[in-house]
């Protein structure tokens, strides 16, 4: 499978898990040229196909003039990939259950195996600190670089009033973390509800975070989720193609009959 | 695509997002005659087809005698379209997560990018202030006009114990706002839960609301959601047609065999 | 459509809305003989077909020896139909969001149009008051009669630690009420969450309940939900039949080929 | 149906109910040799087929060298089956709504008919008490045995920061309990929400738990859920096979045409 096809699956997986709505996006660094990255043209994740994938330099300019609209927030990808040479994939999403944490002073905390990476830290990006325009989105290189600095060496950052950015050394890792960030936010809300104000919640401690994420990396843990999700996304793409062929064929057949 | 086909898609999109149940409806002002509007006959949104769309004057009388039952609450559409010449589409829904806000004193507040319009204000319509009958629905021109006055220049109004009304300069905008109003209500509930009583929540401020909604309007932001949702709604309609043809054909085949 | 086919649709509709799990059931009084009622043999709602429907007398004895297992709790149906001559359909369910209200002292209250009937009263049946065995289910005529007395003239009753019973003058009404009881319980939870302890919630008042339920009965309101849900249930049944025929045909074809 | 096919259905049922994600697993004791058990190779539940099922001894060594990756946590199954001769099936899951109870001091309590077994006790396993490595999972015979001791004679145990283990005398019972443990956790959260801090909740008492679980065992209650869920899982497997055949056939047809 080529890079573009893999990126299409990532788009579809994020949509299938409700981590992106019509406005999220995911990029991957080009394997042939680390100064370039791949990202779709401005399209909803569920509609992305390999033909929609474009190549950008790290200043987020398209390598060829695409003649199509681009994501206003593509600077998120370019600036993070510039500041984090070991990162090869970036997800920007409006992950719903994550948004409430970004607008309160309650930090996301690690509480289960699959989301142990939260224990490495999930800072909150306050866009008000870096611009005067009032617009909430990250639509300039300046804001992209500010977000990259807030993210620092962490796996993810919340964006106040907006969503989140999640990164990984691989496309798989960025996607997996995005899915489990959403899940973990839900579980934390529920734990807070049943514990009540001031109630005790046992989060993973530093040693648990280190040991758990270390084992996940070395044991190839995420491939099991990834293979499952890719299989389901591919089945969905196949079903869409069949429906399209059937529609075209059915239309042609009815046209012949009516002659 | 004709006006009626577009309105059918709007009905289907609202149903697919759980924003309308069997009782919601959506209207659009006629492009040929601003004193007229299109609305389905009394039908559940998921069953609406182009043949069900009727034309009404702004007093909510059908232009031709349709010989079919009409929505009792069609006055919502006529009266708002009368009071708001710049509005071209009106959604009335029982958007579930919005209802609890209508029956408490907790106002909906803007907290994220896609629902920034909430910051323009979402008043609550108290039907008790305008009638004595006790029935909760808006089934007279008088109540429709009262609701239109409560709505004022705002993008949406809650209806206490009932649902909401959402408007837009375009059909797309009224639908998009309806979907994100429901989402934002859920996120606000969750933020209130984790912040706890009296806890701090950072809502979008006035300048953020203005800048964000302004950019959304000028950048054509909503078309990305709209195109996705229309594609999915159309695929659903196509699947229904295929199932219907298959059923008819299968019945005919079995009938021939049994002869 | 015959009585049995209509009852099958009711089973499917309740399952599709998550109001019944594998253990709920719905009965209807026989149109030919008001001293008899129809109910499925002990089967999960999603698997019920017309062949599974049996006839019972009001003591809940099957009219013909069916040679198949029966619901242990069929006395719920017989005893309520005995005590309520105007009732023609009874739903017993484990409607999930309703269960928490049955085990707390928080009463269900009417808060929206479609669930206004809650304002007529939803008492709680405490099985401990009527038996010593400790088993939580209603598996004797004695317990069925006690439940019928607790229900009184009301549209529904909660069963502590178990579920609910919902009745109606028609099958449509019992099903519609079951669906909206579940929805209204969710909205009430959410309203309580955002209002906070002691916070104000505006429920429908007596006059509103009377006017709203009265209009719903006279205007044929529920037929719009009912027609939609029946259409979807029928489409599901059709799809199951096609899958079954295809499976049988596919097996036969592969068998011929392998000869 | 053979043992392996039944175990495949169990995997699919757990996935369909959201009780397992890509990482849960379910085992059954071999009917021919009680010192052996069946478990899939390291695969996501939704992808498991009969060919993936392997046989292990009670020390969790595969009987034949499989040449494929194994679940790191298979010791959960072996050690529990060793300590509980009457148990014939073990589910390990990351049942989402159950996790918050494992990280707070709020015990799961029995509150409804289908989850009455919770009243027999659901202890919490604190992995910190049994190891120093910090890794949260049960990946050694030592930890598996510690978990088995914490479980004791109970039907289920929560694993702090991780998930749960659920057992049964039959595969059906372990699966049914897993599904209803998840449901009951949700209902308990909701009851706690509406009751408020210190509010009264009526849980099933000891006699009710004993009478209800006793009746469920003797009356064959669970078979109704089980048959429904198996039918749905089998339909899903059939649909996957059809899609696969269609894809292969379609590819071959297009290849012939292009010659």
Image (cartoon, coloured by chain):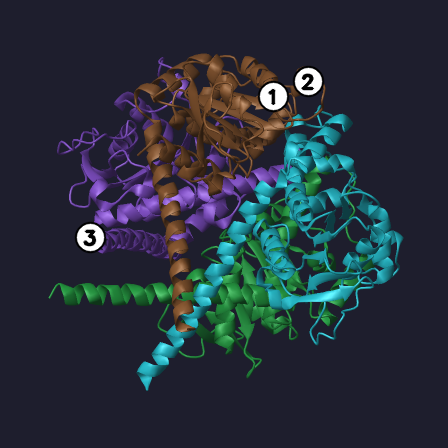
Chain colours: A cyan, B green, C purple, D brown
Quadrant position of the N terminus of chain A in the picture: bottom right
Residue to which mark 1 is pinned = D140
Q: Decide: is A188 above or below B129.
A: above
Q: Earlier in the sequence, mark 2 or mark 1?
A: 2
How far across and how far down the image is residue B198, in percent? 76, 36
Instruction: Give x and y (percent) for residue C11.
Output: 32, 43
Q: Is residue D69 above or below residue A227?
A: above
Residue A209, compared with residue B92, is above or below; it is above
Numbered disc in front, either 2 or 3? 3
Q: Is residue D201 visible?
A: no
Q: Are marks 1 and 3 on the same chain?
A: no
Label 3: few (<14), some (14–19) or many (≥20) C-alpha neighbours in 10 Å: few
* CB-based contact (under 8 Å), mark 2 and mark 1: yes
Label 2: chain letter: D
Q: Position of residue D12 (x, y in %)?
A: 44, 39
What is the number of the mark on residue D43? none
Q: Is residue A44 above or below residue A204?
A: below
Q: Local crowd at mark 1 within 10 Å, few (<14), some, or many (≥20)? A: some
In the image, are marks 2 and 1 on the same chain? yes
Chain of the residue on which disc 1 is drawn: D
The residue at the far left in this view is B259
For image coordinates 34% across by 46% down, the residue present is C12
Disc 3, SS: loop
Measured as percent of width and height from the top left, residue C236 is found at 35, 53
Label 2 to label 3, Cα distance in Å? 61 Å
Front position in the image: B107 or B14 = B14
Residue topped by disc 3? C259
Q: Nearer the viewer, residue C226 or A203?
A: A203
Please give the label number shown on residue D131: 2
Using the numbered discs, state the Cα–Cα distance from disc 2 to disc 1 in whole angstroms: 10 Å
- Mark nearer the viewer, 2 or 1: 1
Dots 1, 3 in contact, CB < 8 A? no
């Amino acid at each position: 499978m080529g890079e573009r096809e893999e990126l299409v699956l990532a788009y579809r997986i994020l949509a299938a898990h409700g981590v992106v709505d019509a406005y999220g996006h995911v990029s991957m660094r080009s394997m042939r040229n680390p100064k370039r990255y791949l990202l779709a043209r401005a399209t909803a994740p569920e509609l992305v196909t390999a033909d929609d994938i474009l190549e950008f330099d790290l200043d987020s300019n398209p390598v060829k003039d695409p003649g199509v609209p681009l994501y206003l927030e593509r600077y998120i990808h370019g600036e993070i990939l510039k500041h984090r040479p070991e990162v090869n994939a970036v997800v920007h999403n409006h992950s719903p259950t994550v948004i409430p944490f970004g607008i309160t002073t309650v930090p996301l905390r690690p509480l289960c195996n699959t989301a142990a990476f939260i224990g490495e830290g999930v800072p909150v990006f306050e866009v008000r600190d870096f611009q005067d325009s009032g617009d909430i989105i990250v639509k300039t290189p300046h804001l992209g670089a500010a977000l990259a600095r807030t993210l620092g060496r962490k796996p993810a950052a919340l964006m106040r009033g907006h969503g989140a950015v999640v990164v990984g050394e691989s496309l798989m890792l960025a996607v997996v973390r995005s899915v489990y960030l959403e899940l973990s936010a839900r579980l934390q809300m529920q734990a807070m509800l049943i514990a009540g104000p001031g109630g005790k919640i046992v989060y993973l401690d530093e040693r648990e975070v280190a040991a758990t994420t270390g084992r996940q990396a070395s044991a190839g843990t995420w491939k099991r989720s990834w293979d499952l999700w890719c299989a389901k996304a591919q089945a969905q793409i196949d079903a869409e193609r069949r429906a399209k062929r059937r529609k075209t064929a059915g239309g042609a057949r009815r046209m012949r009959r009516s002659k």
